Amino acid sequence: MSLVIDGCEVASLDANCCSEWIEKLLGQKPCGPAGGPQWAIAHCEDGVTWGSLVGEGWRLGSAAFPDLCPRPAPEKLLELRIFSEEEEVLIWRVPGRRDLLAGRLVRDDPGSPGDLPPAEECRPLLGNKLLAQAEGFARVADGSGVEQVLPVTSLDPRPRLRVRHYFAANDAGVARVALSRLVEVL
């Protein structure tokens, strides 16, 4: 069966390209000016760190609140998403190969053939109580005391994550969500 995903292009990223993205996030390589708002979320063995691109460099929650957010060390990185309105980079550890990274780039392609346009939803982010603010980040908690650091400066309105879903139909015409990506922190 063939599978075409409407509304986007998907490209694989090799281990070298993945390492370059991580080096940019950590300030070890220049990023260049941002074409628009960009965010990152790094899932590491020792926690989660959000980031936002400011000017030509990344600002990380680990700099603002190091007691809660780990600095994303390449050897402890499990998954990294760098995303914007136009595209998302997803990098992950290859299962069974702690030394190997793989990834993919999803870029919007409004001119792609197909009858299944992408759909979006906004999901609320954890945290309805503001505990502290620093360097463009807010330390927040929920009612159970779980905390995280978000790349926002206010909880009004409540922070949300915009997600875009792309669809594909198989040869029989049955459509399903084939891929979802992060778009924006609101």
Image (cartoon, rainbow, N blue to C red):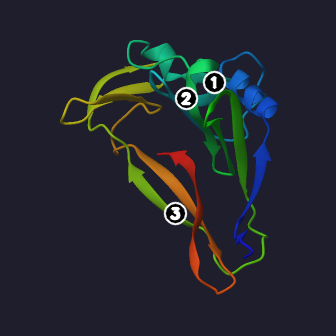
For residue 33, which numbered disc appears in the image? none
Q: In the rendered view, would you say 60 is above or below 18?
A: above
Local SS, label 2: strand
Q: Are marks 2 and 1 in contact (CB under 8 Å)?
A: yes
Residue 3 position, x and y percent, is 71, 72
Report crowding for label 2: few under 14, some 14 to 19, many 20 or more residues within 10 A (C-alpha).
many
Q: Are marks 2 and 3 in contact (CB under 8 Å)?
A: no
Marks 2 and 1 sit apart, C-alpha to C-alpha, by 6 Å
Residue 13 position, x and y percent, is 77, 41
- The residue to which callout 3 is attached is 120
Local SS, label 3: strand
Local SS, label 1: strand
Q: Is residue 117 visible?
A: no
| Residue 182 falls left or right of residue 6 | left
- The residue to which callout 2 is attached is 51
**Of residues 180 and 83, the one drawn nearer to the viewer in this rendering:** 180
For residue 58, which numbered disc appears in the image? 1
Marks 2 and 3 sit apart, C-alpha to C-alpha, by 22 Å
Marks 3 and 1 sit apart, C-alpha to C-alpha, by 26 Å
